[in-house]
Image: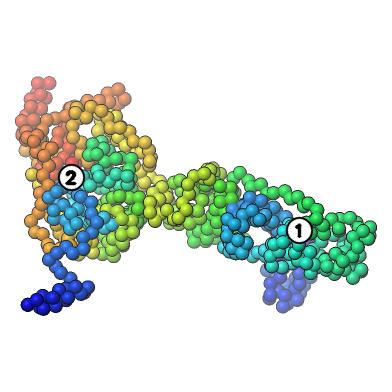
Amino acid sequence: MVESVGRLERVVVADALAQSLGIRAGIRLSAALALVNELEVHRRKPNAEAEALGALACWAQQFTPTVVIAGPAMLLLEVAGCLRYFGGLAALRSRIEAGLLDLAYFVQTACAPTPLAAYWRAECGEAGAITELAGVRTGIAALPLSVLPLDARQHDGLAQLGVVTLADLLALPRAGIGRRFGSEVGLWLDRALGLVADPRTAFVPPDRFIRCIDLDYPFEHVDVFVRLAERLLAELAGYLGGRGLGVQSVSFRFVYDDAPATLLDVGFGRPLRRLDEMLAVLRERAERIVLDAPVFSVELRAERLHALDGQALSLLDQRQQHGDLPLLLARLRARLGDDAVCAIATVADHRPERAWRLAGEGEAAVPPPTGESSIGERPGWLLPESQPLAVRNQLPWHDEPLRCIGRAERIEAGWWDGGGAMRDYWQALGPSGRRYWIYQDRHSQDWWLHGIF
Amino acid sequence: MDKQNSSLGDVLKHPAIWRGDGRATVPACVPSGHPALDAVLPGGGWPLASVTEIVAARPGTGELALLWPMLRHCTGQSICLIQPPLLPYAPAWAAAGIALERLVWLRPGDAAGALWAMEQTLREPGCGAVLGWIDGVDDRAARRLLLASREGGACGFLLRTRPGQTSPLPLRLGVDALPGGVAVRVLKRRGPPLVPPIMLTETSHALAGLIPAQATAGRVSGHRNAA
């Protein structure tokens, strides 16, 4: 890993193999290449790092409303108010650590009554929790002086005095230190000890969730996409949980190298925020995804968010008892396509083919047309298109002779909109016992089969 | 004698002994709405949390008359129609007393999609009845459907055009339209086999009386001549 400092490029991190070849953090890239000419160099992306930290701040808001972005790789969470809810400090910490591990981040946590003490201890890898303000002084005593954000001259001066740890610094008289190195040295210490207020600006989450994963190597397989989407959705779930929101549909944007970006919309049927529910729908949708070209970047957008707090979410897993029909329909829609899931409704029209329509799922029921008595019995099955019938021995024929029973129902309608129909409908019985719904067109006198009872 | 009877009773209590005469385990059922049919079905109706196979050679051979009464009583839960052979005609289904807003019509393109959809809907406790028109369901797939229905508790119906040779489904019926009504043959059930078919008579059109179509045709042709 290499970062740019001014016009120079310096090595930040080197893996074990590179280290064994003599490459150390801090040397220049040109020096490293002089040592080993076949280096795999990754450039650091500060923008991507900041974006990832912002996303993690969103994610962390599911644990506490007060999250502070404190440094290039540091988040401060104010957890004193929510310990009881999460079942104590240890439980909360393990939950946060496990969640970050699921998102494939390595984390070093620390816990202290003041933000600065927690910051320093986390930076130095001191995992032990300090819960009492009185314990802060001993807690930070062993930390090296490098945690203080001082300039090189001040660090050098303190080092010449033989001050190596914060304990050494705390032992010195404050007034003399202030005169020699400036008052901010004492101020940092007082903030860490909780003697001086240390106000922080809390992180304000964005109104929409947009998160992008850029890849160094493009992918073509849908499985890879599903894995990336799992990660993106996990971050989305944390964001939604922190803000008390749910999302009903999300869209994924695929960026290709030389083709215009494409969008993939995934609808969930109802607002939700649980990761497993979102994944259940996505996995079905994944069956139908076709990637045209290698994908370089995947972006998740959740633009329309719905308030979920205040609604009764399940305390226990409600799916065991009542089921979750909207989610099922969303999964069916994701796998089979939007057109494959529909409902039917009646329409007040006398023409049989227009007396029904496809309806959106869950649409309010239209009361059936009144005056039932004037309308004859209707067949349960309607043919998509009425089918012409041959006439044999003066009887309409559909694999068997059809004998009309009852009285004709004359339907004459639609002359006003161009779809005119002048028909005499009959119920017809075949020798097999099947009952058909046939009509005779009054213009052409042809017989047509329109439905089956 | 007493001793003999008691030892026989002991033997019969053994879990490995299956008695063919009775319908020992009665599954939870909903009435089919046809008293004649309820009388011969084990449990007195359509079994819940199970899949029933109905063989109807063509659409309109009486399967709707057989199933509509059950669907009418399926209130508060959804009814899923998977790949019906023709359009379910909304006015007729509404007139039959079925709540259309609870009806979900699924149109997967192929048999694999239909099977998957049926399995998913059967697994959903919010579905009261699942009707799948799927042909070519092998034993393995049928067993999957049966397991899914155990999970969801719905009343599943697998409608096929040809009876398979064997099937793991516990209840299999065949329907045929006859001039006097609908004949239901019990192809397989738990308990003793049943040979004679059951007639479900419909009275709605039987009272209408027959009008020879010849007379109609004649009248129409006369009309045409006059014109």
Depth check, front residue: A440 or A444 = A440
Labelled pair 1, 2 in contact (Cβ < 8 Å):
no
Q: Position of residue A128 (x, y in %)?
A: 69, 67
Q: How many marks?
A: 2
State which quarter of the image contains the N terminus of chain B. bottom left
The answer to whether residue A75 is left or right of residue A102 is right
Residue A268 in percent (x, y) is at 46, 48
The chain under label 2 reads B
Q: Which mark is residue A116?
A: 1
Badge 1 local density, few (<14 within 10 Å), some, or many (20+)? Answer: many
Q: Is residue A141 left or right of residue A388?
A: right
Q: Are marks 1 and 2 on the same chain?
A: no
Callout 1: SS: helix
User: How far across and down, in percent of the image, does residue A387 sit?
Assistant: 21, 39
Residue bearing mark 2: B65
> How many other residues sit within 10 Å of disc 2, few (<14), some (14-19) or many (≥20)?
some
Considering only vertical position in the picture, is A424 above or below B33?
above
Question: Is residue A381 placed above or below B42 in the rendered structure?
Answer: above
Q: Disc 1 residue type?
A: Leu
Answer yes or no: is residue A375 visible: yes
- Report the residue that reaches farthest toward the front: B2
Closer to the camera, A201 or A90? A90
Subunit bearing disc 1: A
Q: Is residue A79 left or right of residue B221?
A: right
The front one of A128 and B90 is: A128
Image coordinates of residue A60 in percent, x first then y, are 62, 55
Q: Amino acid at mark 2?
A: Ala
Q: Residue sitting at 12 percent across and 47 percent down?
A: B200
Of B170 and A227, nearer the camera is B170
**Left or right: residue A81 compared with residue B113:** right
Quadrant location of the C terminus of chain B?
A: top left
